Image (cartoon, rainbow, N blue to C red):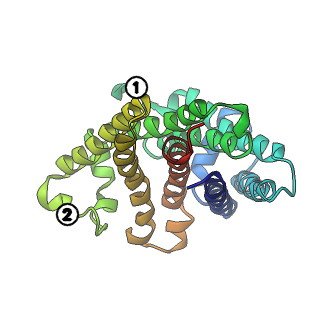
């Protein structure tokens, strides 16, 4: 995979994900998540739910279009980067709000809202690599793209060891032809522990592989991490009500589509660590 292929893949992932998210929010899906964000900034009283959805959706659709235009060199990349910063930083700053956290569990983000928000950490490293490659070294790009992958796998993987999360994923796991067998072998909590252990283990191993520049370890752990993010995409097909508007462009769709960004992070790591010729 050369840089051209990587750029094409990243552009497709980013434009597709933000286009779908934009349409979803513009149609009014999952308004509570947006209201919580606007409440943090004190704008909830001046805008109704419909306007909040339209504003957020329009911004994300604009980002998708700006990403494509910048990739095709129709515009400079600055507008795409600025929009990406806005789309990412606005929700991320709400992690400072106490209602985003579960203090009794040591500070894990609340299921749904918090988990979805931490995924925005993956966005800016992708745009820096896509449009500002030469501003940073390869090692810096690898580190910036590794951090969000490790963060989400350790964080969400860690939550799998708690009963409330184990029960929360039952409806997704039991309808998946790839994962439902876990409930035949393990209890609900046991299956969740296996999933969480897998996430945490390979998040650590890919970090070790990068640190030691061990290509075999990077390949094995990278493919394992990739399988996590690709598996979540299958939920859009296998979950109850698959292909309905409430799944693809609803809360589940919004949560799952964001995992495409982590596929992009892993593509960047692979490109720079495995495929780019040494100078």
Instruction: Report the side of 227 relative to 261 (left or right).
Output: left
In the rendered image of this protein, does residue 190 appear above or below residue 208?
A: below
Sequence order check, earlier mark of 1 and 2: 1
Residue at (86% x, 48% y) in the render = 76
Q: Position of residue 11 (x, y in %)?
A: 67, 56
On the image, which quarter does residue 42 sit in? top right
Task: From the image, state whether disc 1 or disc 2 is nearer to you.
Answer: 2
On the image, which quarter does residue 142 sit in? top right
- Residue 265: in sight, yes or no? yes
Instruction: Report the side of 192 relative to 108 (left or right).
Output: left
Q: Considering the numbered disc 2 on the image, is that residue within a helix, a strand or a loop? A: loop
Q: Position of residue 153 (x, y in %)?
A: 40, 40
Q: Which of the pair 177/74 is nearer the observer?
A: 74
Q: Name the residue under label 2.
A: 181
Residue furthest to the left: 185
In the rendered image of this protein, does residue 242 appear above or below residue 153?
A: below
Q: Which of the pair 134/17 is nearer the observer?
A: 134
Question: For the residues marked 1 and 2, what is the alpha-carbon distance in whole angstroms?
Answer: 33 Å
Q: Which of the pair 113/150 is nearer the observer?
A: 150
Q: Where is residue 176 in the image (x, y as percent from the top left)?
A: 31, 66
In the rendered image of this protein, does residue 218 appear above or below residue 184?
A: above
Q: Considering the numbered disc 1 on the image, is that residue within a helix, a strand or a loop? A: helix
Q: Mark 1 points at which residue?
A: 103
Q: Which of the pair 112/225 is nearer the observer?
A: 225
Task: State how many labels appear.
Answer: 2
């Amino acid at each position: 995979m050369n840089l051209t292929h990587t750029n094409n893949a990243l552009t497709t992932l980013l434009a597709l994900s933000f286009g779908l998210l934009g349409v979803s929010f513009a149609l009014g899906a999952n308004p509570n998540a947006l209201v919580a964000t606007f409440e943090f900034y004190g704008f909830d009283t001046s805008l109704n739910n419909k306007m909040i959805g339209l504003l957020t959706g329009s911004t994300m659709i604009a980002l998708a279009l700006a990403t494509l235009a910048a990739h095709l060199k129709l515009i400079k990349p600055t507008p795409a980067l600025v929009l990406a910063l806005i789309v990412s930083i606005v929700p991320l700053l709400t992690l400072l709000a106490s209602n985003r956290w579960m203090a009794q569990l040591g500070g894990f983000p609340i299921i749904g809202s918090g988990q979805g928000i931490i995924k925005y950490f993956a966005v800016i490293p992708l745009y820096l690599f896509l449009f500002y490659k030469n501003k940073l070294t390869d090692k810096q790009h690898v580190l910036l793209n590794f951090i969000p992958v490790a963060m989400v796998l350790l964080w969400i993987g860690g939550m799998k060891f708690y009963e409330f999360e184990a029960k929360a994923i039952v409806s997704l796991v039991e309808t998946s032809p790839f994962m439902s067998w876990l409930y035949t072998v393990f209890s609900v909590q046991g299956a969740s522990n296996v999933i969480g252990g897998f996430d945490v283990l390979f998040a650590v191993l890919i970090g070790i592989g990068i640190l030691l520049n061990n290509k075999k370890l990077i390949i094995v752990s990278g493919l394992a991490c990739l399988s996590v993010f690709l598996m979540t995409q299958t939920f859009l097909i296998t979950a109850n009500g698959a292909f309905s508007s409430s799944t693809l462009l609803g809360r589940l769709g919004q949560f799952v589509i964001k995992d495409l960004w982590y596929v992009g992070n892993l593509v960047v790591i692979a490109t720079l660590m495995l495929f780019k010729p040494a100078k």
